[in-house]
Amino acid sequence: MAPLGRLVVLLTVLVLLLWGVRRTHGRRSDVRVITDENWRELLEGEWMIEFYAPWCPACQNLQPEWESFAEWGEDLEVNVAKVDVTEQTGLSGRFIITALPTIYHCKDGEFRRYQGPRTKKDFINFISEKEWKNIEPVSSWFGPGSVLMSSMSALFRLSMNIRTCHNYFIEDLGLPVWGSYTLFALATLLSGLLLGLCMIFVADCLCPSKRRKPQPYPLKKSLPEFSQPLKKVEEEQEADEEDVSEEEAESKEGTNKDFSQNAIRQRSVGPSLSTDKS
């Protein structure tokens, strides 16, 4: 009977261990993992999201409280999630994570940053008593779905890719640090030139240049059109000058005629006066 009793004890211990492991896994499954691919699920419903890093001591201290709070998620009708910023650099840039751990509350697409105490009881009261209404939501300009934050997300991912390439050049290929920097400088220069050429090509296609060489024939044809008013003005001035010269000539002729008539009269009067005196 002794071996049978030992077997029962071993089976009991094994069942307890399996139950404990299942319970532990059940607790972990209450916290949903958010990535760059499924982050738009945050825009619907109510969420509490924690941004953490595995190497962060404060994040490690928060994990038990966060896991316990996640067990109340179904009763509170809130989804409890977490984001590993070391793996999801795009979300780190989309939410502008500058401190760890960072907690956000989301309600139907409106994001608010939680800055209260970090215990299970405080988290539960924050949701059940709707304390989040006292916090100003993040502006739509800086919301995770805006164009600005999407650009920041792309920039963060690009920086991480550059860092990965840098480590590959140094560790795997054995290049010196200055050699890796030189490669990045050349790549930046070439990409800038290609981007400039593409922009010039697109601008030329959208707004083609209208500069053309001057054509002699249209200019010659257009000259008479512009010169006609000038010619008319010159002709009118010449006509006025002719009229003035004719009037002056007529006035001179009139004065000459008057002078000649006066002279004739004086001559005719002169002899008569002499005869009378005699």
Image (cartoon, helix red, strand yellow):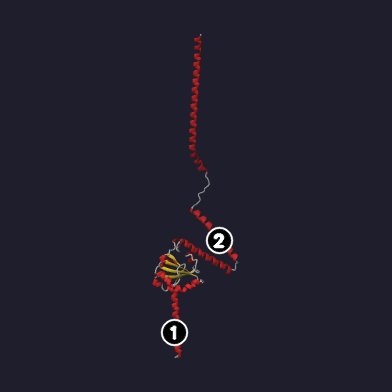
Q: Secondary structure at mark 2?
A: helix
Residue 166 horizontal/vertical position (percent): 56, 66
The dot on residue 70 is: none
Which residue of the protein is positioned furthest toward the bottom in this rendering?
1
Q: Is residue 259 above or below residue 78?
A: above
> Is residue 125 in view?
yes
Left or right, residue 173 beside residue 224:
right
Which sits earlier in the primary sequence, circle 1 or circle 2?
1
Q: Residue at x 47, y 73 (%)?
A: 63
Packing grade of label 2 (10 A; few <14, some 14-19, many >=20) is few
Residue 119 horizontal/vertical position (percent): 45, 72
Q: Are marks 1 and 2 in contact (CB under 8 Å)?
A: no
Packing grade of label 1 (10 A; few <14, some 14-19, many >=20) is few
Residues at marks 1 and 2, CA–CA distance in whole angstroms: 65 Å
Left or right, residue 126 beside residue 202:
left
Q: Is residue 185 above or below residue 214?
A: below
Q: Is residue 120 above or below residue 13?
A: above
Q: Amino acid at mark 2?
A: Thr
Nearest-to-viewer mark from 1 and 2: 1
Q: Is residue 131 above or below residue 25?
A: above
Q: Amino acid at mark 1?
A: Thr
Total residue callouts: 2
Residue 120 horizontal/vertical position (percent): 43, 72
User: Dot 1 corresponds to which residue?
Assistant: 12
Closer to the camera, 115 or 32? Answer: 115
Q: Residue at x 44, y 82 (%)?
A: 16
- Which quarter of the figure is the N terminus placed in? bottom left
Q: Residue at x 45, y 86 (%)?
A: 9
Residue 144 horizontal/vertical position (percent): 45, 64
> Is residue 30 in view?
no
User: Dot 2 corresponds to which residue?
Assistant: 188
